[in-house]
Amino acid sequence: MKYQAGRIEHNDNISHEHPLKEFVLILVALSVAVLLGFLALGWLVDVVVDRMDARTEARLSALVAWTPPRSEPALRGREAWTQALVDDLLACAGVAQPVTVRISRARAPNAMVAPGGLVIVHTGLFDHVQSENGMAFVLAHELAHMAQRDHLRALGRSLVLIAGATVLTGDGSATAGVLAPAQHLGQSRYSRGRETAADARALATLNCRYGHAGGATEFFATLQREQGEASALAHYLASHPSMAARIAALQGAMRQAGIGTGVLRPLPRF
Amino acid sequence: METLFLLAFWTVPIVLGYVFGRMAEARHYRSIIAREKNFVHLPATSLRTLLGNGPVARSELVTGSVVIAVDHFKKAASTLRALVGGPVKSYETLLDRAKREALLRLKESCPGAHEIVNVRLETMPIAGSQPRQVTGVEVLAYGTAIYYVEQSAVA
């Protein structure tokens, strides 16, 4: 047998495709698949949440609820006043469960609902409304989220996201970390559609409680004036319809339903 | 903002890995091809018997080994590939280069030999600081260099 030395003319052991092609192809295909899966599962969450009965909702809320610490002593006055306001609104808002109000010292004008009938109000919100009616509208908006079970929807979506990330990566490690901000996104924000629905519901609640919807646009008008300067608001504004659009939508809805404005009750001095 | 930081945190090493990894790979292939041409006269086979048939003056164990780093682009591409399965193309060139480089270093370690027989290749991953992490590969080539009594070398 004769040995013939040779040089590698065409290397069959490596693929001659551009390395980026494989990378981009898999990345795009996976992103599309994940997005479609998330949308489908999100829709499924909506179906489940809509069909859930009140007892199941209460049991589910109890699982994730936490007992909030009392507000700091200096804020107790605001807490008691806001609690009374919320209690007055409950029947009109169509919320059956008891609601607890907690005031949190934070400059961002914000209010949010947490599972277990908890409404958290930032102190900054008090500087952004001029009347009790204005505050009542913001609280009614949050109660509308509660009545619409929007926090359960957000919770369901983030559960889907965490489960999906864990299944895809095999563990909760490095790759799952990429999705961490998205989980946060799912927890703290509702879709624009849910926000608009909550606005409409809050309007009805306000009309039911006071006999008119005066002060409904107060908070948004204040935000609109500040929009240019305050960057701290950016995160809040991002998921919400623009202020001008929201004010216009509210005024349109008021005209359509024949809801007028009336005398506003003053905000107590704290 | 945090998302942007996180995105940069993940993208920058991958882009760096792609740019410098591609440059290093192209340079390495040029060197491999040129050196293989210089050493084409020295046969290295996996045979257990000799190619030549003259009296052997001397034989010795020779080794050649190389360690090549896995860049972050190759790692990211293989991570993506691991999700869907199939050939990990980004590692093919890495291992091809490592094997050919190890064989070249084997030959360069015994320039006066007439042939190298019983050549074997071993591949080992170099582990990183975290479990299951791989930062590079080592390929070791070893064989027996044969020196014939002069004038009876392989034709």
Image (cartoon, coloured by chain):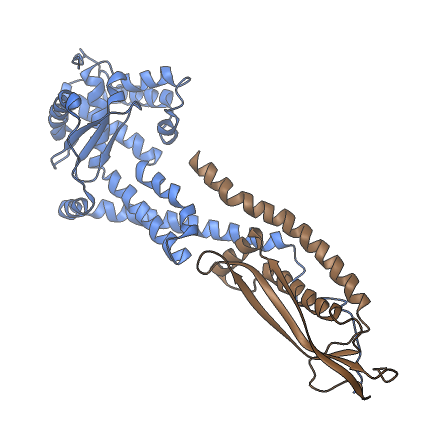
Chain colours: A blue, B brown
Q: Is A144 on the left-hand or right-hand side of A225?
A: left
Q: Residue at x 18, y 17 (%)?
A: A132
Q: Is A184 on the left-hand or right-hand side of B112?
A: left
Expressed as whole percent of the image width and height from the top left, the position of residue A129 reads: 25, 16
Residue lying farthest to the right in this orientation: B151
Picture layout, residue B127 above or below residue A44 = below
- Can residue A213 be spotted in the picture? no
Q: Nearer the viewer, residue B113 or B66?
A: B113
Question: Where, by quadrant of the figure, is residue B126 drawn?
Answer: bottom right
Q: Is B77 on the left-hand or right-hand side of B144?
A: left
- Can residue A134 be spotted in the picture? yes
Picture layout, residue B124 above or below residue A154 = below
Q: Nearer the viewer, residue B27 or A239?
A: B27
Question: Where, by quadrant of the figure, is residue B120 drawn?
Answer: bottom right
Q: Is B73 on the left-hand or right-hand side of A8?
A: left
Quarter containing the N terminus of chain A: bottom right
Q: Residue at x 19, y 12 (%)?
A: A262
Picture layout, residue A52 above or below residue B106 = above
Residue lying farthest to the front in this orientation: B58
Expressed as whole percent of the image width and height from the top left, the position of residue B52 reads: 80, 85
Question: Where, by quadrant of the figure, is residue A270 drawn?
Answer: top left
Q: Nearer the viewer, residue A229 or B135?
A: B135
Expressed as whole percent of the image width and height from the top left, the position of residue A267 reads: 18, 14
Q: How many marks?
A: 0
Expressed as whole percent of the image width and height from the top left, the position of residue A64 reads: 20, 45
